[in-house]
Image (tube, rainbow, N blue to C red):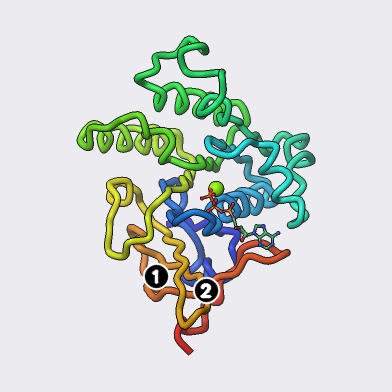
Amino acid sequence: MIKISTGVEGLDEMLGGGFPRGRVYLVSGGPGTGKTIFSLQYLMAAVERGEPGIYVTLEEPLSFIRENVDSFGWDLKQKELSKRLKLLDFYAVTFGEESFETKGRDSSEPSFSIIREVVNAVKAVRAEHVVIDPLTSIVIHEQRAGVKRYKIGEIFSELRKIGCTALFTSEITSSEGEFYMEEFLADGVIRLNKTIQDFDLIKTIRIEKMRGIKYDEQPRRYIIDERGFSVYHTEPVRV
Ligand SMILES: Nc1ncnc2c1ncn2[C@@H]1O[C@H](COP(=O)(O)OP(=O)(O)OP(=O)(O)O)[C@@H](O)[C@H]1O
Ligand SMILES: [Mg+2]
């Protein structure tokens, strides 16, 4: 099995090298836990290694994302010019006037038109990595649980077929012990969590599942600073 670096210091060690290649992963967490930064860091590391990647934003305008990552010194523009990185802005499609109907798409099937465009972009740059941020927004229109599960399964299957390693962010509420259907369907799940302990904010990362490999099951602390996202993989959470 070939493993690929997550680009996150400390997490590769927890995974015994990185993510098994060519599969579908979720980075799930509550608001502001760092899902977007994590997923972009993964992609930047891949592009640095010479492996092309696609990033799709659905809930935050691309211009904001560009500004947000400036402080990490990630030069998205230069990576785009090198044709190894393609950023797709679906924010306008999700929230703006450019609705699915005005784009001539079937409003009841937004998931398919998005995935179709992603697959085309993957082929155009021969991408090896895809980030979709977040999955939540693609299937939000579907109320029926069974249909939603089927659609998520189909989206994952499309991405597995094209041979990319895919990372989806996923928005979850903070209730411990709750599982989301996408977590059963993905090949691996990374959970980001924020809790208050004795008036202190504790941010932890945990590998909820990772099919096919042995991994560190313990939660570990993580930080986001000027160097980006990193994990203290050798320290216990409670000291
Ligand atoms: N340059 C930085 N230095 C330190 N911390 C930062 C920096 N940039 C962002 N952060 C931290 O990362 C958090 C947000 O990260 P990010 O946007 O990746 O979260 P998210 O989980 O994607 O949020 P959302 O649910 O809103 O999409 C911020 O709330 C902030 O605490
Ligand atoms: Mg985000």
Q: Which label lies toward us, 1 or 2?
A: 2
Secondary structure at badge 1 equals: loop
Q: Is residue 128 above or below residue 190?
A: above
Residue name at image x 68 percent, y 41 percent:
64
Residue 83: image tag = none
- Image label count: 2
Q: Earlier in the sequence, mark 1 or mark 2?
A: 2
Residue 7 x, y percent position in the rendering: 60, 59
Amino acid type assigned to the residue bearing label 2 in the image:
Leu
- Tell me the distance, in whole angstroms, between the alpha carbons under discs 1 and 2: 26 Å
Residue drawn at point x = 41 percent, y = 40 percent: 136
Image spot of residue 179 (x, y percent):
28, 55
Is residue 233 placed above or below 205 in the rendered structure? below
Task: Identify which residue, 53 or 232, lies in the foreground.
Answer: 232
Residue at 58% over, 26% down:
92
In the displayed structure image, the side of residue 239 where residue 71 appears, left or right: right
- Please tell me in which quarter of the rendered image ligand 1 is found: bottom right
Is 67 rendered above or below residue 142? below
User: Residue 191 at what x, y percent from top left?
Assistant: 42, 61
Which residue, given by chain and number where applicable, does mark 1 sit on? 215
Q: Residues within 10 Å of mark 1 (few under 14, many from 20)?
A: some
The residue tagged 2 is 201
Q: Is mark 2 within 8 Å of ligand 1?
A: no
Q: Name the image quarter holding residue 154.
A: top left
What is the three-letter code of the residue carrying label 1? Tyr
Q: Quadrant of the N terminus?
A: bottom left
Q: Residue at x 52, y 13 (%)?
A: 103
Q: Nearer the viewer, residue 183 or 22?
A: 183
Helix, strand or loop under label 2: strand
